[in-house]
Amino acid sequence: MKKKKKKIRKYIRLFIVFVVVLIIVFAVFVTLKNTVLKPSFLKNVSYDNYVSINYYDIYGTHLNFKGEFENKDNLSNLKLILKDNDKEITIPWEIKENNNKIEFTTNDYINEGINLESLTKGTYYLLVKGQAEDEDIYYPLENNTEYNNLEYYTLTKNGKNNKIDITWDNYEGNEILKFQIKNTSLPNDVYDITIDPGHDANDTGKLACSNGSPVTNSGLCKTGTLYKESDVNLALAKEIKNQLENQEYKVKLTRENEKDTLPTYGHMGSATTANDTKSKFNLAIHHNSSGISGGSSYLKGLELYIANDSSLDLAKLFVKNITEYANTQTSPKTQDKIKDGIYQRFFTEKEINEEENPPANKSTNTIYYYAIREVGGIATHAYNDGRYDNLDKNPYYNSNNTAESYLFEMGYLDNVQDLRNIQSNKEEYAKGVVTALQEYLK
Ligand SMILES: [Zn+2]
């Protein structure tokens, strides 16, 4: 009996020792992780002077910051940098200085700023750097927004992707912004590009007859074949998808069949699929109609609708390549036009005043088309927060991580010349879209 008790006591003692050792190892590991394993330069950051971040947003392939701080140490040569132990990458910014108070933005265009596609594998910290005499001083960033960590998958290139985790991390209790970039493969539900063939089986969009004869009030053609915009959009979207997939991009269509219907703001809806799938681009494919019957619409050609506050680099490439490849032209329409073939359709004063009740948060800098506005979240002033009885809430209206969206009106279905070209030249329209993206992303 005594022997047995002794044995049990021995085992209990051994167990206690084991638990204590485990706790010590864990504590050492945590300490190491927070100090030794973090880059040594974090020790030298001036945690007593924070740079306040008031806005940050990923739109498409670009990340932007807005912030302010006080230049307490009278630093010269101020820079925004991504730093690791070996190198510093300077991030271009625009700064305004007023009595040592500095305001900055990485870019005023929502689709410019830090190009996330260009960052290479590693762990970096975003800091403001300056010089006092011969000494380098670093200020950390502090999150003063309602937003949190961001996650980004780069576009597929040679079958490979990076995952970028942008995390509000801490160093010995101090807030610090970390960028961690790792090689990865795309999760099943993450895509590069979403294509939304505008409309669906319930809402077919514009109608036209093949020979230009007028569409009757009941939506039929007296002679010739009836073309529904929804079907024409789908056929072109599928062709663009094929060609993009030949370039190894992972592409999601919002709908696959002529008979499909889809919600606007529900899961995998026309305005949500791009963000549900973490796509970087959303291409809304449409075809136009002037409403002038008889096939002689003087309106014809391409209109590309873009977001507010946008650099035109990609838009110009779309217009150039589509018109060249498809042998079409830009539309003569002047309303909302900002450049040849490029349009920005904002709400007008009148439309805002005729507001539904309760009123939406919109201004004359708010884009009219939901396929652009609601897809872009805060970058494009999405406002569908669920206040309307007849509309579901857009789950991304307040998102700061969204797809860059373009709405293509490829041509006029009630212009016979355009219609023929759209029917016979689909591959070339698609080639224009795909080539533009390739040139932009090169
Ligand atoms: Zn349409």
Image (cartoon, rainbow, N blue to C red):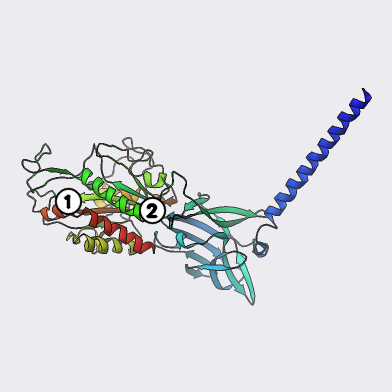
Residue plotted at (50% across, 70% down) = 97
Pointer 2 residue Cβ closer than 8 Å to ligand 1: no
Residue type of the residue flagged with mark 2: Tyr
Q: Is residue 80 left or right of residue 4?
A: left
**Residue placed most toward the observer, 139 or 321:** 321
Residue plotted at (22% across, 62% down) = 323
Q: Give the residue furthest to the top.
A: 1
Mark number, residue 119: none
Residue type of the residue flagged with mark 1: Gln
Residue plotted at (60% across, 73% down) = 131
Element type at mark 1: helix
The residues tagged by marks 1 and 2 sit, at their Cα atoms, a distance apart of 26 Å
Within 10 angstroms of label 2, few (less than 14), some, or many (20 or more) residues? some
Residue plotted at (19% across, 50% down) = 288
The percent position of residue 385, horizontal first and vertical second, equals 39, 42
Closer to the chain start, of discs 1 and 2, is 2
Q: Give the residue furthest to the bottom.
A: 133
Name the residue that disc number 1 marks. 423
Name the residue that disc number 2 marks. 249
**Residue placed most toward the observer, 137 or 40:** 40
Q: Is residue 74 visible?
A: no
Q: Is residue 74 left or right of residue 216?
A: right
Q: Is residue 259 visible?
A: yes
Element type at mark 2: loop
The percent position of residue 47, horizontal first and vertical second, equals 64, 61
**Residue placed most toward the observer, 95 or 403:** 403
